[in-house]
Amino acid sequence: MSVRGHVCVFAGITFAVALAGWGGDAPLSQSAYEEIEVKDGGIIRGTVRLVGDASAVESFEVTKNEEYCGSEKPSPRLTVGPNNGVRNAVISIEGITRGKAIPRGAPPVLDQRECEYEPHVLILPVGAQLEIVNSDPILHNVHGYMLRARPRSIFNIAQPNKGQSVLIRARRFRAPELVLATCDAGHPWMSAYILVTEHPYHAVTDANGEFRLDGVPPGSYRVRLWHEGVAVVETEFEGGRAKKYHFEESYESTQEVVVPPGGNVTVDFELALRPSTRD
């Protein structure tokens, strides 16, 4: 697994920013994406599988609202299904500038349910709105950080009531970006990623680790895997309880593919976790 990036520490979370993709120092914008009628479009499909043992991935202690959230939460940063399929990995075609129409409709929803974000990884087209919902009867505070180059806050919303909904305006998402959402209301285990994308050839792997990109114009492409960092490398405590977590760098790799007219191409990725470096 090739990993390219640098590490930032912000809002109590350490994350890697891929230099060639979302959130890096390199320009995120490519030439404007052109929507065309795709003739003889092909399909890129495959699976992301974990290589090795995931049992070392730790759960998080619940430090607030234990009566509702429970005593601990499994890490959302690595979910492994049947046959070691990895959920919530992101697969994308790099640098594609022409292709099928970008889907538009109701704003995607980021929900807070049972003290976790749903979904954990969400794809949002450039210029779309995002709806944030609190389905829990407790206070959550959703803080979104843009990770491009130097991280900065782009929204910070308190939602004290169950059923409360807030719409984040499209002007917040004017360019391709990777946004990290955390909870500032005493729930440091909560995190989610919002990928703001300028073309529709992105997919998040399902519970079986599978993905599918369809309507791909015939041609040669580079397909990229991105997966967030998994291991906790440092924990900050306050009053004997975890207050903030710092995580390892993200994972990234690419493969070259050729999509023939009307073809069906399989691209499989392997995710090999790094040895633990926790202090």
Image (cartoon, helix red, strand yellow):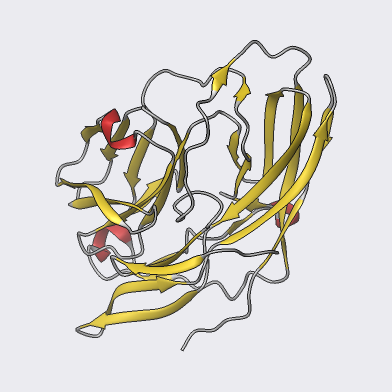
- Image spot of residue 189 (x, y percent): 36, 64
Viewer-closest of 65 and 91: 91
For the image shown, how many numbered marks are present on the structure?
Answer: 0
Q: Nearer the viewer, residue 61 or 151?
A: 151
Q: Position of residue 268 (x, y in %)?
A: 78, 48
Rendered view: 232 above or below 36: below
Res. 209 in view: no
In this rendering, position of residue 102 left or right of residue 175: right
Establish if 222 lies above or below 215. below
- The residue lying at 63 percent from left, 40 percent from top is 94
Q: Is 8 on the left-hand or right-hand side of 16?
A: left
Between 169 and 152, the one lying in front of the other is 152
In terms of image quadrants, where is residue 210?
top right
Above/below status of 261 relative to 154:
above
- The residue that appears at 58% across and 36% down in the rendered structure is 202
Residue positioned 46% across, 40% down in the render: 122
Residue 171 visible in the displayed image: yes
Quarter of the figure with residue 63: bottom left
Residue sitting at x 62%, y 65%: 3
Camera-side residue: 4 or 144?
Answer: 4
Q: Is residue 253 left or right of residue 190?
A: right
Q: Quadrant of residue 105?
A: top left
x and y percentages locating residue 82 in the rendered image: 71, 52
* Quadrant location of the N terminus in the rendered image: bottom right
